[in-house]
Amino acid sequence: MLTRMTGAQLSALYDAENQWAVDDDFFLTFVNERPNSRVLDLGCGTGRISLAVAAHGHDVVGIDPNSASLTAARQKPGADNVTWVDGTSAQIPEEDSFDTAVMTAHVAQAINDDADWSLTLADVHRALGPGGRLAFDSRDPAAKAWERWTPGNTRGAHTLPDGSIMETWMESVLLPGGLVALTEHRLLGGSLDETESSVLAFRSEDQLRQDLGLAGFEVERILGGWAGEEVGSGQGELIVIARKPH
């Protein structure tokens, strides 16, 4: 539906719901394995990872198709140290060659069309220099995370910077082809009630390996948790690290 909430409110809600966590530590550590590098943050959102990576001395380009998210990112401390681009992988600056690329916060699943996903991987592969590395996270379909996305499990309340209270909860529906329809309900100030729906792709480990191989990547490893656990360990993650061959 067409939201009546402002872009600033939605960006503030995103930040309230997505605080720095162990997954961010993982990606920051991954990027820092190559000091003073050129980093692409694809699907950067409101800039949480981009800003942290830039603060560690890297040259960062953050790309996102949501202009309101980028507006919020540009207003944060340190934003001048990041190059912000409105768009998708198709807008990766052609003149740049990156050492590292990341897609965090399960943004890979938001690219739910397989053809678009293949194009994204091809674009990232093209943007990386020889030996450049890619890391991203995707939920393991075997863990069936969508079964826990119910109103009872996800209901919460957040205070936005303008003082308003936002109540949220989620529900999901499993669709054919490894897709899940996710609906977030939002109740602002007890009166403005609306929903936002999205479709997420749950790709298996085998599918991700195949997709990466077709795009020209070599898979270094796929982890099942943020402390290096094996796939199927109970963490419910597929954390992928791949490399563009020399």
Image (spheres, rainbow, N blue to C red):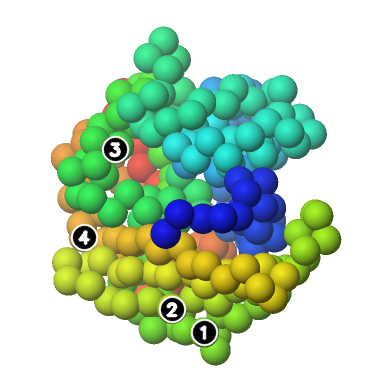
Above/below status of 130 relative to 175: above
Mark 2 = which residue?
A: 171
Residue 229, visible in the rendered structure: no
Mark 4 = which residue?
A: 206
Q: In which quadrant will I find the N terminus?
A: bottom left
**Mark 2 or 1, nearer chain start:** 1
Residue 204, visible in the rendered structure: yes
Query: Is there a contact, CB below 8 Å, between mark 2 and mark 1?
Result: yes
Residue at 51% over, 55% down? 3
Which residue type does callout 2 highlight?
Answer: Glu
Where does residue 58 sit, x and y in percent of width and height? 64, 26
Residue at 57% over, 26% down? 84
Mark 1 = which residue?
A: 151
Where does residue 106 sit, x and y in percent of width and height? 45, 56
Give the SS element for disc 2: strand
Which of label 4 and label 3 is nearer to you?
3
Q: In which quadrant will I find the C terminus?
A: top left
Where does residue 133 sit, x and y in percent of width and height? 42, 35
Question: Relative to residue 171, is residue 204 drawn left or right?
Answer: left
Mark 3 = which residue?
A: 121
